[in-house]
Image (tube, rainbow, N blue to C red):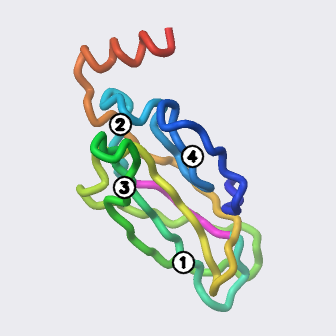
Amino acid sequence: MFITNSTGANNSVATGYIRPGEIGADSLAMEAFWFNVYSAYLGCDNSGPEGCRMELSGYTYTGFTDDELLAYQQNVTIPPCPSQKGCQLQRVDFPPIMRGLSGLQIRAFVGHEQRIWFMDNLALGWYDNSCEAGLQRAQVHG
């Protein structure tokens, strides 16, 4: 569960800047930590009547500016759950452009109000799944 407010950690670029509601690479500049996003099951704290707009943003690191750039943004609408019990998470498939990311930010809104969101079965993969990249990741966390 994430609360998407302004309490994200502001770290240096060397370790990564984390936006509220963001899942990010351990070290932005190291391609070995970039990832692909394939799918997720999402839900939102919303009893209705309108749906919950999930804002899905993919970021990629660029050495030119030493920062992340918004590479892709998609909005999906999750139906409300009037009873707030037994609610089903909705499967969201991400397009092929959501590859080689340094960050994935998810925010939920009902109207203009941010909401708590829920996620399960986030399907990720390494952008670079080579042995060399695996060794780099192991050295950083070894």
Q: Earlier in the sequence, mark 4 or mark 2?
A: 4
Residue at numbered disc 2: 34
Which amino acid is tagged 2? Trp
Q: Is residue 69 magenta?
A: no
Q: Position of residue 17 (x, y in %)?
A: 54, 44
**Principal secondary structure, stretch drawn in magenta:** strand
For residue 132, side relative to residue 126 (left or right): left
Which amino acid is tagged 3? Leu
For residue 24, side relative to residue 108 (left or right): left
Residue at numbered disc 3: 69
Q: Position of residue 117 (x, y in %)?
A: 65, 63
Relative to 88, residue 133 above or below: above
Q: Residues within 10 Å of mark 1 (few under 14, many from 20)?
A: many
Range shown magenta = 39-44
Q: Earlier in the sequence, mark 2 or mark 3?
A: 2
Q: Earlier in the sequence, mark 1 or mark 3?
A: 1
Q: Earlier in the sequence, mark 4 or mark 3?
A: 4
Q: Secondary structure at mark 1?
A: strand
Residue at numbered disc 1: 53
Q: Position of residue 85 (x, y in %)?
A: 76, 69
Q: Position of residue 18 (x, y in %)?
A: 56, 46
Residue 18 is tagged as 4
Residue under the point 57% across and 53% down = 19
| Quadrant housing residue 81 | bottom right
For residue 96, side relative to residue 67 (left or right): left
Question: How far is disc 2 from disc 3 in space, using C-alphas?
Answer: 14 Å
| Quadrant housing residue 96 | bottom left
Residue under the point 38% across and 67% down = 73
